[in-house]
C-alpha cells in the first residue's frame, strides 16, 4: 500500500510537473482552470479516485499529433482504469483553449505593437514627433 | 525488493522511458521519489529549506524521466545519479535565493515601525497603520515577492487571521481527503516553511 508521505511527495512533484507540457499534470491543471473544477470533480469526470490523479499527473502527456496517440491514451486509461474517451476529451479541450488563446493574443499584439511604435516616435522626437501620446495633452500644468 | 530485482526493475523502467512509455514516468516517480528525497536529505544535511529540497529532488527526477538518455546505466546507479543531480540543483537554488536576497533592500519599514524589539511582521493595523502609503505598498510588494505562489499567500492570510483549524489549511492545499493526522503534519510543514520565509523577510509571525 502506498504510504501517505509518498502521496505528499508525489503531489509536490505533480505541482512542479504542471509547469511542463511534457507531463499530464499540465493538462490536468489547465482543464481544471478552464472548467473551474475542484480536484474531486475532475476525478469524478475521469471516473477515478483522486489519488489516481496524482499518478496520472506524472505520466507523459501523449502527443495528439503522434501516430501513437491512440495507443498511448489507451495504455494510460487501462493502467489507471480511467474512461479513455474522457481523457481524450480533456486533452482536446485543453489544446483547443490553448490554440484560441494564442489566436486572441496574436490579435491583441498588433495594436500593442503600433502603440509601442507610436510611443517610441514620441520619445525619440522629444515630444515633437508627428505621433503624440494623447495623454500628454491632458496633463495638468505642474 | 532485493538488490538484484531492483536493478532489473530499474533497467526495465529505464528502457520503457527510452521507448516513451507514457506511464513509465509516473511509475518511476512512485517507486523512487521517496528514496531520492531521503538520500538528498542525508547528503544535504540539516538546515536546508525543506521546500527547496523537495523542489530539487522533484526537478531532478522529472528531468530524468523527460530525458532518460542523459543517464548511462553502465556508469552509475540511477539513485546515485539522481541524488547528485538533485544536490546540484539544490545548491543552484540556494545560490539563486542568496543572490535574490543580496539584491533586496533591508526591510527598514518593519524594523522601524516595531519599537518593542519583537521584530515581528504582522500585516495588521499595528504595522500597516503606522506607516505611510508608500511604505505600506513597498511592504506588501515585498510580501508578494517572498510568496509568489498564490496558494502560499492564501495560507499566509489564514495564519495572519489567526486561523487554527487544520481543515481550512487542508482545503487550500487540496489534502482534505487524507487522514486528519497526516493533514496536520502536512499543514504544520507548510506553516513552518512560511514562517521561515517570513523570518528571512525580516521578522516573525505572531511572536512564534
Image: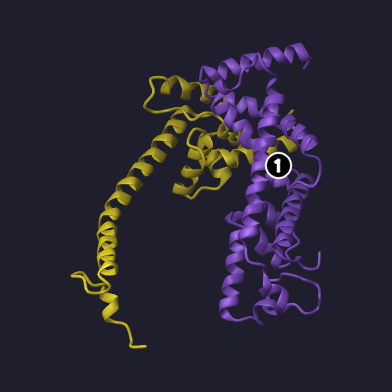
Q: Position of residue A91 (x, y in %)?
A: 43, 35
Drawing shade for chain B: purple
Q: Is residue A64 above or below residue B156?
A: above
**Vertical placement of B64 versus B103: above or below?**
above
Q: Chain A is drawn in which colour?
A: yellow
Report the residue at 47% width, 32% height from top: A87
Query: Which of B163 and B33 lies nearest the eye of the viewer?
Result: B33
Residue A73 visible? The answer is: yes
Residue B28 in which image quadrant: top right
Residue visible at 75% across and 77% down in the picture: B114
| A135 relative position to A22: left or right | left
Q: Which quarter of the image is occupied by the C terminus of chain A? A: bottom left
Q: Residue at x 44, y 47 (%)?
A: A34
On screen, residue A7 above or below B82:
below
Q: In this view, does A19 lie to the left or right of A55?
A: left
Judging depth in this view, the residue of B128 and B183 nearest the camera is: B128
| Residue B10 as seen in the image, left or right of residue A102 | right
Q: Quadrant of residue B73?
A: top right
- Of A107 and B53, nearer the camera is B53
Label 1: which residue? Answer: B53
Q: Residue furthest bottom?
A: A141
Q: Position of residue A122 (x, y in %)?
A: 26, 69
Q: Is mark 1 on a helix, strand or loop?
A: helix
- The answer for which chain carries disc 1 is B
Image position, residue A79 (x, y; %)? 57, 23
Left or right, residue B121 beside residue A123: right
**Can you give x and y, in whole percent of width and height, for residue A86 in the image?**
46, 33
The total number of labels drawn is 1
Label 1 crowd bin: few (<14), some (14–19), many (20+), radius 10 Å:
many
Amino acid at each position: 500500500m502506498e504510504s501517505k508521505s509518498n502521496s505528499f511527495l508525489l503531489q509536490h512533484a505533480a505541482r512542479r510537473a504542471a509547469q511542463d507540457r511534457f507531463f499530464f499534470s499540465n493538462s490536468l491543471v489547465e482543464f481544471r482552470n478552464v472548467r473551474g473544477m475542484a480536484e474531486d470533480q475532475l476525478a469524478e469526470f475521469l471516473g477515478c479516485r483522486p489519488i489516481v490523479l496524482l499518478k496520472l499527473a506524472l505520466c507523459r502527456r501523449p502527443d495528439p499529433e503522434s501516430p501513437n496517440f491512440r495507443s498511448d491514451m489507451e495504455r494510460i486509461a487501462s493502467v489507471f482504469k480511467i474512461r479513455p474517451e474522457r481523457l481524450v476529451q480533456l486533452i482536446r479541450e485543453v489544446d483547443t483553449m490553448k490554440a484560441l488563446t494564442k489566436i486572441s493574443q496574436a490579435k491583441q499584439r498588433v495594436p500593442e505593437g503600433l502603440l509601442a511604435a507610436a510611443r517610441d516616435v514620441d520619445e525619440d522626437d522629444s515630444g515633437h514627433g508627428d505621433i503624440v501620446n494623447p495623454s500628454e495633452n491632458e496633463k495638468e500644468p505642474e | 525488493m532485493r538488490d538484484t530485482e531492483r536493478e532489473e526493475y530499474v533497467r526495465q523502467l529505464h528502457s520503457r522511458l527510452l521507448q516513451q512509455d507514457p506511464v513509465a514516468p509516473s511509475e518511476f516517480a512512485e517507486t523512487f521519489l521517496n528514496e531520492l528525497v531521503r538520500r538528498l536529505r542525508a547528503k544535504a544535511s540539516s538546515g536546508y529549506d525543506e521546500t527547496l529540497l523537495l523542489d530539487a529532488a522533484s526537478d531532478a527526477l522529472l528531468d530524468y524521466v523527460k530525458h532518460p538518455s542523459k543517464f548511462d546505466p553502465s556508469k552509475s546507479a540511477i539513485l546515485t545519479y539522481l541524488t547528485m543531480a538533485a544536490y546540484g540543483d539544490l545548491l543552484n537554488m540556494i545560490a539563486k535565493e542568496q543572490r535574490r536576497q543580496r539584491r533586496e533592500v533591508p526591510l527598514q519599514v518593519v524594523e522601524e515601525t516595531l519599537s518593542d524589539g519583537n521584530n515581528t511582521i504582522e500585516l495588521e493595523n499595528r504595522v500597516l497603520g503606522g506607516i505611510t502609503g508608500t511604505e505600506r505598498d513597498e511592504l506588501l510588494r515585498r510580501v508578494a515577492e517572498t510568496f509568489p505562489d498564490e496558494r502560499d499567500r492564501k495560507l499566509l492570510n489564514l495564519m495572519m487571521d489567526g486561523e487554527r483549524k487544520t481543515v481550512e489549511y487542508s482545503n487550500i492545499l487540496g489534502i482534505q481527503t487524507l487522514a486528519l493526522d497526516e493533514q496536520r503534519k502536512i499543514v504544520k510543514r507548510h506553516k513552518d516553511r512560511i514562517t521561515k520565509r517570513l523570518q528571512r523577510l525580516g521578522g516573525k509571525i505572531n511572536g512564534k
